[in-house]
Image (tube, rainbow, N blue to C red):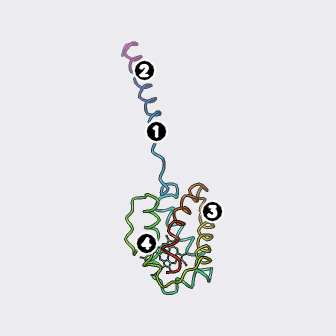
């Protein structure tokens, strides 16, 4: 290849590379910030251990099919974090009916969630985004 042709190719390569840099990458979804499916599974497994160690929370799960709850809770988190999932469980108000969850128990669950997110090294900004989403669902969970 002669020198002028090489120069044309080189210029083209540089232009294409720069165009690639200029294309904005889509912001990661909250789901991605939590490590996608493996990250959510690890978080929920950590959380379930904390629930089992806290009688205030554990007592509410006495009659629960835990593998089913685990699957649906992960699915629900995935959906509200804009992940590639469709939640197939019951509406939250139905799922929590008869459990008589008060504010103290709700707050205890949120504290365990924060501890589990810290243990799983979830960035604080991502943690706060999830907590804000869950806080908006509080009315569907307590005093049902
Ligand atoms: C915003 C906060 C919460 C969310 C998003 C949430 C989400 C869910 C989901 C997705 C399910 C599965 C629904 C189904 O079985 O079809 C569930 C079930 C359940 N949740 Fe929650 N939950 C929240 C707070 C709480 C709190 C504070 C407690 C208190 C301990 C709690 C206790 C339970 C129990 C015991 C079940 C299983 C009920 C059953 O066995 O039928 N949840 N929750």
Q: Is residue 134 above or below residue 8?
A: below
Q: Is residue 96 above or below residue 19?
A: below
The front one of 7 and 106 is 106
Identify the residue under disc 4. 72
- Is residue 62 shown left or right of residue 23? right
x, y percentage for residue 39?
51, 61
x, y percentage for residue 7?
41, 16
Numbered disc 4: secondary structure: helix
**Residue 124 tag number:** none
Would you say the beta carbon of the disc 2 residue lies within 8 angstroms of ligand 1? no
Residue sitting at x 43%, y 58%: 83
Quadrant in the rendering for residue 10: top left
Q: Is residue 105 above or below residue 12?
A: below
**Residue 118 tag number:** 3
Residue sitting at x 59%, y 55%: 123
Disc on the earlier residue, 1 or 2: 2
Between tags 1 and 2, which lies in front?
1
Disc on the earlier residue, 2 or 3: 2
Would you say the beta carbon of the disc 4 residue lies within 8 angstroms of ligand 1? yes
Q: How many marks?
A: 4
Mark 4, other Cα within 10 Å: few <14 / some 14–19 / many ≥20 = some
Residue sitting at x 50%, y 64%: 40
* Residues marked 1 and 2 touching at CB (< 8 Å): no
Magenta span = 2-8
Disc on the earlier residue, 1 or 4: 1
Report, in whole angstroms, how far the alpha carbon at label 1 lies from the one at label 4.
34 Å
Quadrant in the rendering for residue 131: bottom right
Identify the residue under disc 2. 11
Report, in whole angstroms, how far the alpha carbon at label 1 lies from the one at label 3.
30 Å
């Amino acid at each position: 290849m002669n020198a002028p042709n090489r120069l044309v190719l080189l210029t083209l390569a540089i232009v294409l590379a720069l165009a690639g840099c200029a294309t904005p990458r889509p912001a990661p979804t909250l789901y991605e910030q939590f490590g996608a499916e493996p990250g959510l599974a690890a978080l929920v497994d950590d959380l379930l251990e904390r629930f089992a160690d806290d009688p205030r929370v554990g007592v509410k799960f006495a009659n629960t099919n835990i593998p089913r709850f685990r699957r649906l809770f992960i699915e629900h988190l995935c959906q509200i974090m804009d992940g590639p999932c469709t939640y197939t469980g019951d509406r939250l108000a139905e799922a929590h009916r008869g459990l008589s969850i008060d504010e103290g128990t709700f707050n205890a669950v949120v504290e365990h969630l924060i501890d589990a997110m810290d243990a799983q090294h979830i960035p604080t900004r991502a943690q706060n985004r999830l907590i804000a989403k869950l806080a908006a669902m509080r009315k569907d969970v307590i005093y049902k």
